[in-house]
Amino acid sequence: MKVILLGAPGAGKGSQATKIAEHYNIPHISTGDAFRSNIARGTEIGVYAKSFMDKGQLVPDDVVVKIVAERLSHKDCENGFLLDGFPRSIPQAEALEKLTEVDAVVDIEVDFSVITARLTGRRTCPCGESYHISWLNSDTCPKCGQKLFIRDDDKEETIKQRLDVYQKTTEPLVAFYEERGVVKKIDGNRPIEEVFASIKEALG
Ligand code: AMP
């Protein structure tokens, strides 16, 4: 099963991605996580990517495509994968088409007011999990115990820029994949478990 997760920042892609990957036993490929891991390790790609991420901009297509192409060439992607946060532009989607064919594109739709509230209250763990301050009464990760942090790009000015970039550059992908007949629209204005149930139903 080759699946793409689409949705604005804060739509819940990360939370759903973990569940989908576990349920269908496919690797979860998050370009955002890949960049954050590069930043944490101080690699050249990390330093380069951070300069775009901190401004709420997209990392240039050629860099992202290279990372994804390399990851998709691994053996564990042969029978399927879940792409979270990629593609984010039409050129990235076109590059992906040259690498492989996808079976489904899950588009998580969430109202913009909900998204802003989610992102400003988001706390992230180095392990990749994220939580919302409205229900988590701790500064450590309930799963692994590491200290949670606020992503640099979850600051209010950056959030606005990220949402603008999403509308201009990423949202056109919905029409791109609709033309290919693979889009599954999911109402993301609901609790995580309800959204996940709808995704499972849509993917079969
Ligand atoms: P995410 O964790 O998916 O929200 O990604 C965090 C940031 O990493 C984004 O705001 C971009 O700056 C960068 N990024 C992640 N994936 C991509 C992509 N496919 N294309 C360009 N930039 C990306």
Image: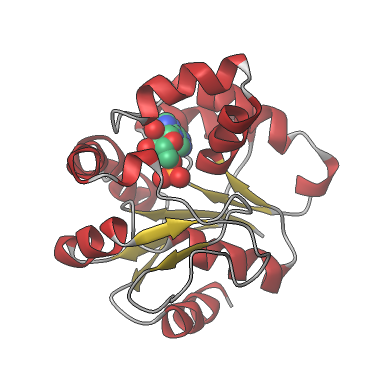
Q: Nearer the viewer, residue 97 or 51?
A: 51
Q: How many marks?
A: 0
Query: Where is residue 8 drawn, in percent x and y?
Result: 31, 53
Report the front residue among 96 and 25: 25
Taking the image as shown, residue 46 lies to the left or right of residue 91, namely right
On the picture, is 181 further left or further right than 110? right
Ligand 1 falls in which quarter? Answer: top left
Residue at x-position 26% and y-position 42%:
166
Quadrant position of the N terminus in the picture? bottom right
Quadrant (top left, top right, bottom left, bottom right) of the C terminus = bottom right
Outermost right residue: 75
Quadrant for residue 176, please give it. Answer: top left
Report whether residue 161 is seen.
yes
In this rendering, does residue 182 appear at all? Answer: no
**Rendered location of residue 9, percent (x, y):** 33, 51
The structure residue drawn at horizontal position 24% and vertical position 61%, both measured from the top left corner, is: 115
Can you say whether 121 is above or below 97 in the image?
below
Q: Position of residue 96 (x, y in %)?
A: 54, 34
The colour style of the image is: secondary structure
At a point 55% along the width and 62% down the height, the residue shown is 17
Q: Is residue 179 left or right of residue 2?
A: left
Q: Is residue 180 above or below residue 193?
A: above
Determine which quarter of the picture holds residue 80: bottom right
The picture places residue 101, in percent across and down from the top left corner, at: 60, 44
